[in-house]
Image (cartoon, grey):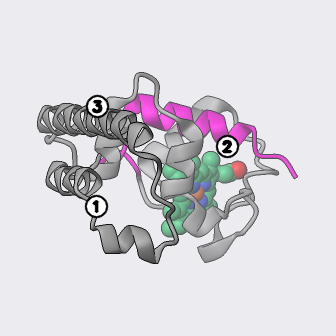
């Protein structure tokens, strides 16, 4: 989510570029009649960016109850993205392809566990693997468990 204040400053910057900055970047100034249409385009782009920034901030206000910014992003999506969750929470031990084995993590490419059994391990943890019950909701755990079934050499 873009910081609305930053977006606004950025918009101002677009609307009022420093002429010497344009010269430094080797930007060739367009002909006068072209400049007018360009200015209009830039103004409407700026307004669009500002509206988008406002929309973004009200959206985040409605989801501030999550435990982390990332969990919020996942919760905001209609369907949890198993791959995204995996990359965020699981790669530290299992690696991107499931076979890294850090801290004695099992090779997920070779796991024979069924979906429900994986869900149970992820939810409650097992030996050195931490429980994800407090970090992920049931739908997210199911999505990431499904994703681990797809990890193949
Ligand atoms: C702190 C390191 C660590 C993290 C983070 C971690 N795991 Fe594990 N995982 C392990 C270890 C260690 C085992 C083996 C547990 C045992 O010895 O019983 C394991 C086992 C598993 C198993 C069981 C495999 C089998 O065949 O028995 C699954 C499924 C699994 N992890 C999925 C995940 C998923 C999905 C995530 C992310 C949400 C995750 N793990 C995050 C360390 C981790």
Dot 3: element: helix
Residue 17 circle label: 1
Is residue 52 part of the magenta span, yes or no? no
Name the residue that disc number 2 marks: 148
Q: Nearer the viewer, residue 63 or 35?
A: 35
Q: Position of residue 102 (x, y in %)?
A: 64, 74
Cβ atoms under marks 1 and 3 closer than 8 Å: no
Dot 1: element: loop
**Ligand 1 located in image quadrant:** bottom right
Q: CA distance from mark 1 to mark 3?
A: 16 Å
In this rendering, does residue 110 appear at all?
yes
Q: Position of residue 71 (x, y in %)?
A: 33, 45
- Give the class, few, some or many, for how many residues have Cα within 10 Å of label 2's Cα (few <14, many ≥20): many
Q: Which stretch appears magenta?
A: 132-153
Residue 147 circle label: none
Q: Position of residue 84 (x, y in %)?
A: 53, 45
Farthest residue in the top direction?
Answer: 78
Q: Nearer the viewer, residue 17 or 7?
A: 17
Which of the two marks, 2 or 3, is nearer to us in this view? 3
When the figure is inspected, residue 139 is found, relative to residue 126, above or below; the finding is: above
Label 1 CB, ligand 1: below 8 Å? no
Q: How many marks?
A: 3
Left or right: where 39 falls relative to 28:
left
- Give the class, few, some or many, for how many residues have Cα within 10 Å of label 1's Cα (few <14, many ≥20): few
Name the residue that disc number 3 marks: 44
């Amino acid at each position: 989510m873009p910081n609305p204040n930053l977006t606004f400053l950025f918009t101002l910057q677009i609307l009022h570029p420093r002429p010497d900055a344009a010269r430094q970047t080797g930007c060739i100034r367009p002909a006068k009649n072209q400049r007018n249409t360009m200015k209009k385009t830039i103004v409407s782009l700026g307004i669009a960016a500002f509206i988008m920034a406002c929309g973004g901030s009200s959206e985040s206000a409605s989801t501030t109850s999550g435990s982390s910014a990332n969990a919020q992003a996942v919760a905001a999506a209609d369907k949890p993205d198993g791959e995204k969750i995996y990359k965020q929470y699981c790669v530290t031990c299992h690696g991107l392809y499931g076979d890294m084995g850090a801290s004695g993590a099992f090779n997920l490419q070779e796991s024979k566990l069924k979906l429900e059994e994986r869900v149970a391990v992820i939810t409650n943890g097992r030996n050195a693997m931490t429980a994800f019950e407090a970090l992920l909701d049931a739908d997210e755990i199911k999505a990431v468990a499904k994703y681990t079934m797809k990890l193949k050499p």
